[in-house]
Amino acid sequence: MLKQPDYTTFAKFYDYFELEGTTETAELNAFLTEIFKKNNVKSVLDFACGTGAQSIGLARNGFGVTAADLDEAMLKMASKKAKKEKLKIRFQQGNMKSAKYGIFDAAICIFNAIGHLTRLDCSKFFQNAYKSLNQGGIFVFDILNFNALKTDVFELYKHIDEEAEIDGWLVKRVRDCSLNRRLRQVSIKSYTAWNDTIHFDSLIEDWQMQIYDKKELCNMLDYAGFSKIDFYDQNGAPFIDDRSGSIMAVCFKN
């Protein structure tokens, strides 16, 4: 089993540290929108929506979106943002490896969400994603790239020290990462503290993320049934096996 981060506690700060204070990732959503419209996608399932970064943008661009997540606090944040924009998104709580939400034209799982799964559970998830798609459907996910992280590219991920003022709270986060090459895992130790000059609280975390290379993903996706797979770097940039920090896979069910 992999140790998991505490998204429930961190949910209220997630957008500011992971999305730089925005409600969505515009460049990534533009890439997804282009692919989906090119392939006549109407309905999209977001298996791990978090605070809604992709679900919000895709719904705004006219897709019918079902947004799911394991963490209730993250779902509440996403739902609040959707209501503010009067977007019709169906929110569901569930585990990506087994939950059934229906059949869709496309499915996504973004921001390294599959890294929280063991290899066995990730394989089960890919099979579940395949079964959740219409014939000709598209599955898109991303994950950190082991072949790049075992080079000097990993220096970009080793240490983060950030501070922000969020809704009257001064929030500081420090994170240190190490790479276990044998297990192909990134270990993350982080400390988050927040105060409003009167109240103080903090969160100390120690968790792992499973990472993959392109070859291993191809084997798992082929086993799940996907017949065609295109690989990109973050936001749809060209993929370079030993330099791209992330792998974005666009998989087709034919």
Image: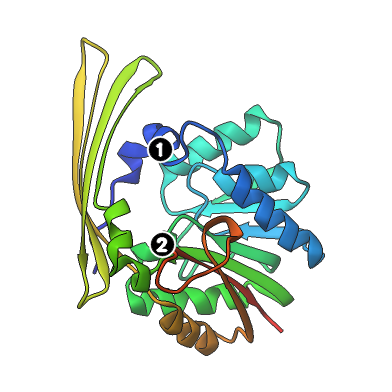
Up-down relation of residue 22 to residue 232 (above or below): above
Q: Residue at x 37, y 64 (%)?
A: 115
Quadrant where the image shows the C terminus: bottom right
Q: Relative to 12, is 65 on the left or the right?
A: right
Q: Determine contact: label 1, label 2, CB under 8 Å.
A: no
Looking at the image, is mark 1 or mark 2 earlier in the sequence?
A: 1
The residue singled out by tag 1 in the image is 14
- The residue at 32%/66% (across/down) is 149
Please, what secondary structure does the residue beneath circle 2 have?
A: loop
On-image quarter of the N terminus: bottom left
Horizontal and vertical percent position of residue 116: 35, 62
Q: Which residue is mark 2?
A: 245
- The amino acid on which the numbered mark 2 sits, given as a three-letter code, is Gly
Kindly give the residue lying farthest to the top in the view shown.
Answer: 198
Q: Position of residue 18 (x, y in %)?
A: 42, 41
Three-letter code for the amino acid on which mark 1 is drawn: Tyr
